[in-house]
Amino acid sequence: MSRSGFVLFSWLAIVACSLMPDGRSVAQVPSATPPSSAAPSSAAPSSAAATQPSAAPVNNIIALLNAIDPYRITQPIDGKIQVFGATSMDNMAHAWADEFRRFHPQVAVEISAAGSGDAFVKLKQNPKAVAMLSRPVKPDELEQLKSETIKHPAAFVVAREALGVYVHESNPIQSINGEQLRMVFTKQGSAAELKWKDIGVTGAIADKPVHLVSRSQNSGTQAFLRDFVFGGLEMRESKTDHLSNSDVLGALATDPLGITICGLRVNAFDVKSLPLVHQGVSIPSDDAAVLSGQYPLTRHLTLVIDLEQTDKEAKASQEFVHFALCRTGQLSAIRAGFYPAELPVLRAGLGLIQKDHLR
Protein backbone atom coordinates (compact mmCIF):
# COMPACT_ATOMS: atom_id res chain seq x y z
CA MET A 1 0.00 0.00 0.00
CA SER A 2 1.27 3.50 -0.77
CA ARG A 3 1.91 5.88 2.11
CA SER A 4 -0.85 8.28 1.01
CA GLY A 5 -3.29 5.39 0.83
CA PHE A 6 -2.24 4.20 4.30
CA VAL A 7 -2.78 7.62 5.81
CA LEU A 8 -6.12 8.17 4.09
CA PHE A 9 -7.55 4.83 5.18
CA SER A 10 -6.11 5.46 8.65
CA TRP A 11 -8.17 8.63 8.69
CA LEU A 12 -11.24 6.73 7.51
CA ALA A 13 -10.79 4.30 10.40
CA ILE A 14 -10.07 7.13 12.86
CA VAL A 15 -13.19 9.01 11.79
CA ALA A 16 -15.20 5.79 11.98
CA CYS A 17 -14.04 5.25 15.55
CA SER A 18 -14.85 8.86 16.50
CA LEU A 19 -18.47 8.65 15.41
CA MET A 20 -20.70 7.75 18.31
CA PRO A 21 -22.40 4.32 18.56
CA ASP A 22 -25.80 5.98 18.98
CA GLY A 23 -25.46 7.59 15.55
CA ARG A 24 -24.41 11.09 16.56
CA SER A 25 -22.13 12.73 14.01
CA VAL A 26 -18.82 14.50 14.36
CA ALA A 27 -17.76 18.00 13.38
CA GLN A 28 -15.43 18.87 10.54
CA VAL A 29 -11.74 19.00 11.45
CA PRO A 30 -9.53 22.07 10.99
CA SER A 31 -6.50 20.07 9.86
CA ALA A 32 -5.63 16.56 8.84
CA THR A 33 -2.47 15.82 10.79
CA PRO A 34 -2.82 12.16 11.74
CA PRO A 35 -1.91 11.03 15.25
CA SER A 36 1.56 9.59 15.71
CA SER A 37 0.11 6.09 16.10
CA ALA A 38 -1.02 6.19 12.47
CA ALA A 39 2.43 7.09 11.14
CA PRO A 40 4.83 4.49 9.73
CA SER A 41 8.41 4.12 10.92
CA SER A 42 10.97 6.90 10.96
CA ALA A 43 12.40 5.53 7.72
CA ALA A 44 9.40 6.99 5.88
CA PRO A 45 9.64 10.39 4.15
CA SER A 46 9.23 13.29 6.54
CA SER A 47 7.65 15.75 4.15
CA ALA A 48 4.21 16.82 5.39
CA ALA A 49 2.97 17.14 1.84
CA ALA A 50 3.99 13.55 1.14
CA THR A 51 2.58 12.02 4.33
CA GLN A 52 -0.56 13.92 5.26
CA PRO A 53 -3.77 14.42 3.33
CA SER A 54 -5.25 17.89 3.38
CA ALA A 55 -8.22 18.72 5.58
CA ALA A 56 -10.52 18.58 2.54
CA PRO A 57 -10.34 14.79 1.95
CA VAL A 58 -10.76 14.11 5.67
CA ASN A 59 -13.76 16.40 5.88
CA ASN A 60 -15.16 14.72 2.78
CA ILE A 61 -14.92 11.40 4.62
CA ILE A 62 -16.71 12.90 7.62
CA ALA A 63 -19.43 14.33 5.38
CA LEU A 64 -19.84 10.98 3.62
CA LEU A 65 -20.24 9.08 6.89
CA ASN A 66 -22.51 11.69 8.44
CA ALA A 67 -24.81 11.46 5.40
CA ILE A 68 -25.53 7.78 6.12
CA ASP A 69 -28.79 7.35 8.02
CA PRO A 70 -28.25 6.80 11.77
CA TYR A 71 -29.53 3.57 13.26
CA ARG A 72 -32.78 3.86 15.16
CA ILE A 73 -34.39 0.82 16.77
CA THR A 74 -37.61 0.03 14.90
CA GLN A 75 -38.85 -2.74 17.19
CA PRO A 76 -37.72 -4.52 20.37
CA ILE A 77 -36.27 -7.92 19.53
CA ASP A 78 -34.81 -10.97 21.24
CA GLY A 79 -33.93 -14.52 20.35
CA LYS A 80 -31.21 -15.89 18.07
CA ILE A 81 -30.00 -14.63 14.68
CA GLN A 82 -28.20 -17.10 12.44
CA VAL A 83 -25.81 -15.64 9.87
CA PHE A 84 -23.96 -17.84 7.37
CA GLY A 85 -22.14 -17.73 4.05
CA ALA A 86 -19.11 -15.84 2.75
CA THR A 87 -15.85 -16.35 4.61
CA SER A 88 -14.69 -12.96 3.30
CA MET A 89 -17.43 -11.33 5.38
CA ASP A 90 -16.73 -13.20 8.63
CA ASN A 91 -14.84 -10.39 10.38
CA MET A 92 -17.45 -7.85 9.33
CA ALA A 93 -20.30 -10.05 10.54
CA HIS A 94 -18.66 -10.39 13.95
CA ALA A 95 -18.11 -6.61 14.08
CA TRP A 96 -21.81 -6.08 13.31
CA ALA A 97 -22.83 -8.63 15.93
CA ASP A 98 -20.73 -7.00 18.67
CA GLU A 99 -22.18 -3.56 17.98
CA PHE A 100 -25.73 -4.84 17.37
CA ARG A 101 -25.81 -6.36 20.87
CA ARG A 102 -25.16 -2.91 22.34
CA PHE A 103 -28.63 -1.99 21.09
CA HIS A 104 -30.24 -5.41 21.58
CA PRO A 105 -28.56 -7.17 24.53
CA GLN A 106 -31.16 -9.97 24.57
CA VAL A 107 -30.16 -11.13 21.09
CA ALA A 108 -27.65 -13.89 20.36
CA VAL A 109 -25.94 -13.78 16.95
CA GLU A 110 -24.55 -17.08 15.65
CA ILE A 111 -22.15 -16.75 12.71
CA SER A 112 -20.97 -19.59 10.48
CA ALA A 113 -18.85 -18.50 7.50
CA ALA A 114 -18.16 -21.50 5.26
CA GLY A 115 -18.39 -19.85 1.83
CA SER A 116 -20.93 -18.16 -0.42
CA GLY A 117 -21.45 -21.32 -2.48
CA ASP A 118 -23.90 -23.01 -0.13
CA ALA A 119 -25.45 -19.87 1.38
CA PHE A 120 -28.69 -20.20 -0.61
CA VAL A 121 -28.99 -23.92 0.18
CA LYS A 122 -28.75 -23.12 3.88
CA LEU A 123 -31.21 -20.24 3.56
CA LYS A 124 -33.81 -22.58 2.05
CA GLN A 125 -33.27 -24.84 5.04
CA ASN A 126 -33.52 -21.94 7.48
CA PRO A 127 -35.47 -19.07 5.88
CA LYS A 128 -35.43 -17.07 9.13
CA ALA A 129 -31.66 -16.60 8.85
CA VAL A 130 -29.31 -14.18 7.07
CA ALA A 131 -27.19 -15.32 4.09
CA MET A 132 -23.91 -13.55 3.29
CA LEU A 133 -22.58 -13.45 -0.28
CA SER A 134 -19.32 -11.76 -1.21
CA ARG A 135 -20.65 -10.73 -4.60
CA PRO A 136 -23.69 -9.05 -6.15
CA VAL A 137 -26.87 -11.13 -6.34
CA LYS A 138 -28.70 -11.22 -9.67
CA PRO A 139 -32.51 -10.79 -9.88
CA ASP A 140 -32.90 -14.20 -11.49
CA GLU A 141 -31.05 -15.77 -8.54
CA LEU A 142 -33.63 -14.30 -6.16
CA GLU A 143 -36.41 -15.63 -8.37
CA GLN A 144 -34.86 -19.11 -8.35
CA LEU A 145 -34.50 -18.90 -4.58
CA LYS A 146 -38.27 -18.80 -4.12
CA SER A 147 -39.58 -22.11 -2.82
CA GLU A 148 -42.03 -23.63 -0.39
CA THR A 149 -40.01 -22.10 2.45
CA ILE A 150 -38.86 -18.79 0.91
CA LYS A 151 -41.52 -16.43 -0.46
CA HIS A 152 -39.95 -12.97 -0.79
CA PRO A 153 -36.14 -13.15 -0.92
CA ALA A 154 -34.43 -9.75 -0.96
CA ALA A 155 -30.77 -8.81 -1.41
CA PHE A 156 -29.17 -5.86 0.37
CA VAL A 157 -25.76 -4.42 -0.54
CA VAL A 158 -24.10 -3.67 2.80
CA ALA A 159 -20.44 -2.88 1.98
CA ARG A 160 -17.77 -2.83 -0.69
CA GLU A 161 -14.52 -4.72 -0.91
CA ALA A 162 -11.57 -3.96 -3.13
CA LEU A 163 -9.73 -6.90 -4.68
CA GLY A 164 -6.02 -6.82 -5.36
CA VAL A 165 -3.85 -8.65 -7.90
CA TYR A 166 -0.97 -10.11 -5.91
CA VAL A 167 2.35 -11.68 -6.86
CA HIS A 168 5.40 -12.76 -4.88
CA GLU A 169 7.48 -9.78 -3.81
CA SER A 170 10.44 -11.07 -5.89
CA ASN A 171 8.44 -10.95 -9.13
CA PRO A 172 9.74 -8.13 -11.38
CA ILE A 173 6.30 -7.33 -12.85
CA GLN A 174 5.33 -3.71 -12.06
CA SER A 175 1.67 -3.51 -13.15
CA ILE A 176 -0.99 -5.46 -15.03
CA ASN A 177 -3.80 -4.53 -17.44
CA GLY A 178 -7.16 -6.06 -18.23
CA GLU A 179 -6.04 -8.05 -21.25
CA GLN A 180 -3.16 -9.55 -19.29
CA LEU A 181 -5.54 -10.49 -16.49
CA ARG A 182 -7.79 -12.31 -18.98
CA MET A 183 -4.76 -14.17 -20.37
CA VAL A 184 -3.66 -15.21 -16.90
CA PHE A 185 -6.98 -16.20 -15.32
CA THR A 186 -9.11 -17.42 -18.26
CA LYS A 187 -8.69 -19.70 -21.26
CA GLN A 188 -9.63 -16.92 -23.68
CA GLY A 189 -7.56 -17.34 -26.84
CA SER A 190 -5.60 -20.36 -25.61
CA ALA A 191 -5.85 -23.03 -22.95
CA ALA A 192 -2.11 -23.73 -23.22
CA GLU A 193 0.11 -23.29 -20.21
CA LEU A 194 0.99 -19.64 -19.74
CA LYS A 195 4.52 -18.46 -19.07
CA TRP A 196 5.51 -15.21 -17.43
CA LYS A 197 7.09 -13.93 -20.64
CA ASP A 198 3.62 -14.12 -22.27
CA ILE A 199 2.58 -11.11 -20.20
CA GLY A 200 5.83 -9.22 -20.68
CA VAL A 201 7.90 -10.38 -17.72
CA THR A 202 11.64 -10.71 -18.33
CA GLY A 203 14.48 -12.11 -16.29
CA ALA A 204 14.87 -15.37 -14.40
CA ILE A 205 11.17 -16.33 -14.37
CA ALA A 206 10.34 -15.34 -17.97
CA ASP A 207 10.28 -18.93 -19.28
CA LYS A 208 8.67 -20.40 -16.17
CA PRO A 209 4.96 -21.21 -15.85
CA VAL A 210 2.46 -18.92 -14.19
CA HIS A 211 1.00 -20.56 -11.06
CA LEU A 212 -2.56 -19.56 -10.21
CA VAL A 213 -3.37 -19.45 -6.50
CA SER A 214 -7.04 -18.92 -5.76
CA ARG A 215 -9.92 -19.07 -3.33
CA SER A 216 -11.91 -22.31 -3.25
CA GLN A 217 -14.28 -22.84 -6.15
CA ASN A 218 -17.43 -22.43 -4.02
CA SER A 219 -16.31 -19.02 -2.77
CA GLY A 220 -18.05 -15.81 -3.70
CA THR A 221 -14.70 -14.42 -4.81
CA GLN A 222 -14.33 -17.01 -7.56
CA ALA A 223 -17.94 -16.59 -8.64
CA PHE A 224 -17.49 -12.82 -8.80
CA LEU A 225 -14.34 -13.11 -10.89
CA ARG A 226 -15.92 -15.59 -13.29
CA ASP A 227 -19.31 -13.93 -13.73
CA PHE A 228 -18.64 -10.22 -13.25
CA VAL A 229 -14.95 -9.52 -13.90
CA PHE A 230 -14.34 -11.98 -16.75
CA GLY A 231 -17.86 -12.07 -18.16
CA GLY A 232 -18.46 -15.81 -17.81
CA LEU A 233 -15.29 -16.90 -19.62
CA GLU A 234 -13.91 -20.33 -18.77
CA MET A 235 -11.38 -19.98 -15.96
CA ARG A 236 -7.99 -21.64 -15.87
CA GLU A 237 -7.44 -24.26 -13.20
CA SER A 238 -5.56 -23.15 -10.12
CA LYS A 239 -2.40 -24.78 -8.89
CA THR A 240 -3.80 -24.52 -5.36
CA ASP A 241 -7.02 -23.18 -3.86
CA HIS A 242 -7.75 -22.06 -0.31
CA LEU A 243 -10.60 -21.25 2.04
CA SER A 244 -9.62 -17.70 3.03
CA ASN A 245 -7.79 -14.64 1.73
CA SER A 246 -5.13 -15.09 4.41
CA ASP A 247 -4.52 -18.67 3.33
CA VAL A 248 -4.26 -17.56 -0.31
CA LEU A 249 -1.60 -14.97 0.43
CA GLY A 250 0.21 -17.33 2.76
CA ALA A 251 0.52 -19.83 -0.11
CA LEU A 252 1.56 -17.09 -2.53
CA ALA A 253 4.33 -16.00 -0.17
CA THR A 254 5.99 -19.40 -0.70
CA ASP A 255 5.59 -19.47 -4.51
CA PRO A 256 7.74 -17.02 -6.55
CA LEU A 257 5.79 -18.03 -9.69
CA GLY A 258 2.35 -17.44 -8.20
CA ILE A 259 -0.34 -14.85 -8.85
CA THR A 260 -3.76 -14.37 -7.29
CA ILE A 261 -6.73 -12.04 -6.91
CA CYS A 262 -8.10 -11.63 -3.38
CA GLY A 263 -9.11 -9.01 -0.83
CA LEU A 264 -6.94 -5.90 -0.91
CA ARG A 265 -6.94 -5.18 2.82
CA VAL A 266 -5.41 -8.47 3.98
CA ASN A 267 -2.25 -8.34 6.06
CA ALA A 268 0.48 -10.39 4.40
CA PHE A 269 4.24 -10.64 4.05
CA ASP A 270 6.50 -11.44 1.08
CA VAL A 271 3.84 -10.50 -1.50
CA LYS A 272 2.94 -7.30 -3.31
CA SER A 273 -0.23 -5.95 -4.91
CA LEU A 274 0.06 -4.63 -8.45
CA PRO A 275 -1.22 -1.33 -9.84
CA LEU A 276 -3.96 -1.87 -12.43
CA VAL A 277 -3.61 -0.24 -15.84
CA HIS A 278 -7.08 0.98 -16.86
CA GLN A 279 -7.60 2.95 -20.08
CA GLY A 280 -3.87 3.57 -20.26
CA VAL A 281 -3.60 4.94 -16.72
CA SER A 282 -1.79 3.09 -13.95
CA ILE A 283 -3.98 3.10 -10.85
CA PRO A 284 -2.31 2.19 -7.55
CA SER A 285 -3.86 -0.64 -5.58
CA ASP A 286 -4.35 1.39 -2.45
CA ASP A 287 -7.13 2.81 -0.32
CA ALA A 288 -6.81 6.33 -1.69
CA ALA A 289 -7.65 5.06 -5.18
CA VAL A 290 -10.56 3.00 -3.85
CA LEU A 291 -12.02 5.86 -1.80
CA SER A 292 -11.73 8.25 -4.75
CA GLY A 293 -13.61 5.82 -7.01
CA GLN A 294 -10.67 5.39 -9.41
CA TYR A 295 -9.78 1.80 -8.56
CA PRO A 296 -11.76 -0.51 -10.89
CA LEU A 297 -11.60 -3.88 -9.12
CA THR A 298 -14.21 -3.62 -6.36
CA ARG A 299 -17.27 -5.68 -5.51
CA HIS A 300 -20.48 -5.33 -3.54
CA LEU A 301 -21.01 -7.52 -0.47
CA THR A 302 -24.57 -8.68 0.07
CA LEU A 303 -26.97 -9.94 2.72
CA VAL A 304 -30.06 -11.91 1.67
CA ILE A 305 -33.17 -12.51 3.81
CA ASP A 306 -36.78 -13.55 3.28
CA LEU A 307 -39.02 -10.56 3.98
CA GLU A 308 -42.12 -12.78 4.24
CA GLN A 309 -40.97 -14.45 7.45
CA THR A 310 -42.85 -13.11 10.47
CA ASP A 311 -41.79 -14.91 13.66
CA LYS A 312 -39.48 -13.31 16.21
CA GLU A 313 -36.27 -14.84 14.87
CA ALA A 314 -37.06 -13.64 11.35
CA LYS A 315 -37.87 -10.15 12.63
CA ALA A 316 -34.55 -10.15 14.49
CA SER A 317 -32.74 -11.06 11.26
CA GLN A 318 -34.50 -8.24 9.42
CA GLU A 319 -33.50 -5.81 12.15
CA PHE A 320 -29.90 -7.02 11.86
CA VAL A 321 -29.89 -6.17 8.14
CA HIS A 322 -31.51 -2.80 8.90
CA PHE A 323 -28.66 -2.14 11.34
CA ALA A 324 -25.99 -3.08 8.77
CA LEU A 325 -27.43 -0.54 6.30
CA CYS A 326 -27.27 2.34 8.79
CA ARG A 327 -24.36 4.48 9.92
CA THR A 328 -23.38 2.36 12.91
CA GLY A 329 -23.33 -0.77 10.77
CA GLN A 330 -21.27 0.93 8.08
CA LEU A 331 -18.79 2.15 10.70
CA SER A 332 -18.46 -1.43 11.94
CA ALA A 333 -17.74 -2.52 8.36
CA ILE A 334 -15.00 0.11 8.05
CA ARG A 335 -13.41 -0.99 11.32
CA ALA A 336 -13.38 -4.54 9.93
CA GLY A 337 -11.39 -3.33 6.90
CA PHE A 338 -14.13 -2.79 4.30
CA TYR A 339 -15.56 0.27 2.57
CA PRO A 340 -19.03 1.74 3.00
CA ALA A 341 -21.60 1.02 0.32
CA GLU A 342 -22.70 3.93 -1.86
CA LEU A 343 -25.28 6.19 -0.18
CA PRO A 344 -28.03 5.67 -2.81
CA VAL A 345 -27.58 1.90 -2.52
CA LEU A 346 -27.87 2.03 1.27
CA ARG A 347 -30.98 4.19 1.13
CA ALA A 348 -32.62 1.93 -1.44
CA GLY A 349 -32.06 -1.00 0.91
CA LEU A 350 -33.42 0.93 3.87
CA GLY A 351 -36.49 1.88 1.86
CA LEU A 352 -37.18 -1.76 1.06
CA ILE A 353 -36.74 -3.09 4.58
CA GLN A 354 -38.58 -0.19 6.23
CA LYS A 355 -41.49 -0.69 3.85
CA ASP A 356 -41.60 -4.30 4.98
CA HIS A 357 -41.59 -3.24 8.65
CA LEU A 358 -44.71 -1.13 7.99
CA ARG A 359 -46.73 -3.96 6.45
Image (spheres, grey):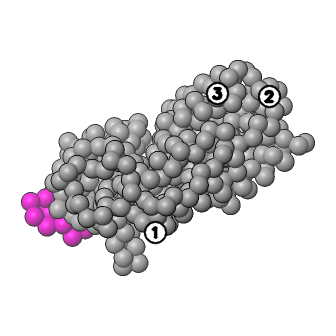
- In what quadrant of the picture does the C terminus appear? top right
Percent x, y for residue 31? Answer: 45, 61
Numbered disc in front, either 2 or 1: 2
Q: Residue at x 80, y 37 (%)?
A: 74
- The disc label shown at residue 76, or none: 2
Reading the image, the residue beneath label 3 is: 101
Reading the image, the residue beneath label 1 is: 294
Q: CA distance from mark 3 to mark 2?
A: 12 Å
Q: Residue at x 54, y 63 (%)?
A: 60
For the record, the magenta segment spans 197-207
Q: Residues within 10 Å of mark 1 (few under 14, many from 20)?
A: few
Look at the image and tell me whether residue 323 can be seen. yes
Q: CA distance from mark 1 to mark 3?
A: 36 Å
Q: If you read the primary sequence from the N terminus, does the residue marked by circle 2 or circle 1 appear first?
A: 2
Q: CA distance from mark 2 to mark 1?
A: 41 Å
Q: Quadrant of residue 345?
A: bottom right
Give the left or right position of residue 191, taking residue 130 as reference.
left
Whether residue 204 is in magenta: the answer is: yes
Q: Are marks 3 and 2 in contact (CB under 8 Å)?
A: no
Query: As shown in the figure, which amino acid type bears the numbered disc 2?
Result: Pro
Q: Secondary structure at mark 3?
A: helix
Query: What secondary structure predominates along the stretch shown in magenta?
Result: loop
Percent x, y for residue 82? Answer: 64, 27
Q: Tell how many labels.
A: 3
Q: Residue at x 55, y 28 (%)?
A: 112
Q: If you read the primary sequence from the N terminus, does the residue marked by circle 3 or circle 2 appear first?
A: 2
Q: Quadrant of residue 176?
A: bottom left
Q: Residue at x 17, y 62 (%)?
A: 172
